[in-house]
Image (spheres, rainbow, N blue to C red):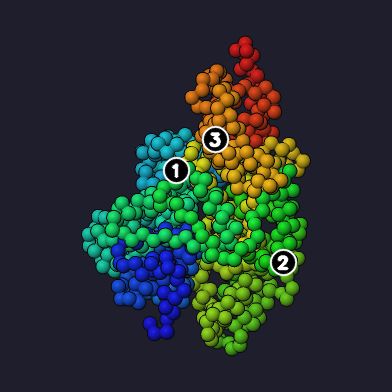
Amino acid sequence: MAGAPDPLDGLDPDQLAAVTAPRGPVCVLAGAGTGKTRTIVSRIAHLIHAGHVSAGQVLAVTFTARAAGEMRTRLRALDIHAAQARTFHAAALRQLRYFWPRVVGGEQWELIDGKLRLVSQVANKLGLGTERETLRDLASEIEWAKASLIAPADYPAAVARFHRETPAPAEKVAEVYTGYEALKNRANQLDFDDLLLHTAAALEEHSAVAEEFRDRYRCFVVDEYQDVTPLQQRVLDAWLGRRDDLTVVGDANQTIYSFAGASARPLLDFTRRFPEATVVRLERDYRSTPEVVSLANRVISAARDRPAGSRLRLIGQRKPGPDPVFVEYDDEPAEATAVAGRIKDLIEQGVALSEIAVLFRINAQSEVYEQALTELGIPYLVRGGERFFNRQEIRQATAALRTAAVQSPTGELPKLVRGLLEPLGLTADPPAGGAARERWESLLALVELAEELAATVADADLARYVHELELRAQAQHPPTVEGVTLASLHSAKGLEWDAVFLVGLVDGTLPIQHADGNEAQIEEERRLLYVGVTRAREHLSLTWALARAEGGKRYRRRSRFLYGLIPENHPTARVAASATRRRDRGMPMIRHCRVCGDELAGTMAFKLGRCETCPVDLDHGLLDRLKQWRLERSKALRVPVYVIFTDATLLAIAEQCPADRAALVSISGVGAVKLDKFGQEVLSVVANATRSSGM
């Protein structure tokens, strides 16, 4: 490996300790922006260079094709080519295909690319809704159950144990799960979850298969270990056998996928399983300015009952930058217009379009920002849309480039690529907008990738460029397209931008309404905000609107997570300043029990407006009527009951018996949208119950 870069160059002391730790169990607790990918890749390279393991004996796994592609790219830069870096599912698919003749025999089963078709057949037979949203929810429940190693017969008990909201009665979901598995197996088909289940079973039940696999792979590295599911942990255990040559890297503060079965518990319990493990903490943040880092630390330090393994405190390493901005708006259109205007200012100051992101809690929030950016002529990309390499123009461009590469043309690579793409729509000047502009931006991204390759690889020619395109297409690792990114907080995980706008930060959205009353879910919502904050390198804006529609009534409350974060001299900090004096700074506005007057503590207490132990006159008949009304509305709208109102909100309504809209909206969990949609119906239920009881 003469001439290969030294993997130890430029590492800080903690990164160096992680990279050079002896073979065996190693746990790297890596905070956001602390260089974990570089640390992982450098450790793999160091182990190989030091002769501890050969490159072909290394298997590194992560959770997204993009992350795996990034890892492979960095390994190639260190002249490491034989080490495997894949997602869990990609690694399992490769192994299952290889071992299938011995484990199962016969023709390999077909891998389906989604569950909806089969789920639809079963749901239809059971008389359940077959709308796409319902089918997606049912499929998600099956995925959660399989990821959690829960069989169909055990599903109802499991959802009760986890207090999990379901898209239909748990028994019905279990029937869908059972029917889905039966249909799939009869057709000799596998889904992506089966790849992991069958791979684990092959290694657990066939000693010869396990022996061959373990002879091939000796060293394992797991990235984003806080996101591992019980099923993925089972596969990892099967890979390891009795060995312990394992390096895991993760951050419990970024655990945001528990709804899909992920758990930070294996990361937090790593030293219990491996008492001799080397543990290294990475806390130097090279991504964000000290101002952003300080805010991130304050967001996560307010979390309750943080386990020891999650108490990372980031230390900013960059030069100081601007303070995070907090802004309150009257309504969402005003918020979106102002954000778009601020984005335009940043662009005029020289910030690249691709270095700006607008992040929100739910995808439905994107529309108003798409409109505001369009009105200012600012290109944008909605992350989570059609994959870059699946777009028609990119498939056409790749085919044209591949054909041209056979002829071995000479000249500067970027000019060659631009010339070949001009007939496909890459004009000298960009189109005004719409689909033509999106096509132009995609083609321009291919030229910029050629410029990047020419700058980093000596004598890079068109054939090498096409090969790079093919590698990226396989990994779904697209080049950067020039446009402002619109993305949900979940899809932003693992990414970063110079400027980040966190928008729509109101209670009921962040934290999401159905998390209320569940402390674990509330804390996951807090971690989601932490992930959003740590995406920003320099510019960070946090905004919220008090009304949804333009000129609407201002019933919303800023997110409870913002209390204690807003500077006391800020115009919107009047409530925040007093909130910091409470024992529990992360809770909503109500501070005192309406029964005894004591200070409130706990999510349910704030929801009810009273201490949970205080006696209260509850109209049980009204509560039953409210639940019956909610059930009927949920069936009519074909949504889970919690989407209408949570149990805690109905209990508060039954206790307080609101007589008008003002009294109803003062109850936690009743925002402007729900007031407009359900307010009159709820008030009618309350009034009818009051009259019938003679109150």
Screen quadrant of the N terminus? bottom left
Please name the residue shown 58% across and 29% down the image: 592
Q: Is residue 543 left or right of residue 89?
A: right
Q: Secondary structure at mark 2?
A: loop
First in sequence: mark 2 vs mark 3: 2
Specify the quadrant of the image occupied by residue 219: bottom left
- Toward the bottom, the furthest residue is 410
Please name the residue shown 57% across and 81% down the image: 454
Q: Secondary structure at mark 1?
A: loop
Tell me the residue that label 1 is attached to: 305
| Residue 50 drawn at (x, y percent) | 32, 76
Please name the residue shown 63% across and 42% down the image: 576
Q: Nearer the viewer, mark 1 or mark 3?
A: 1
| Residue 467 drawn at (x, y percent) | 50, 77
Q: CA distance from mark 2 to mark 1?
A: 43 Å
2 and 3 marks in contact (CB < 8 Å): no
Q: Amino acid type of disc 3?
A: Tyr
Screen quadrant of the C terminus? top right
Tell me the residue that label 3 is attached to: 642
Residue 319, placed above or below residue 642: below
Q: Amino acid type of disc 2?
A: Gln
Q: Can the viewer see residue 118 in this picture? A: no
Of residues 487 and 592, the one nearer the viewer is 592
Tell me the residue that label 2 is attached to: 349
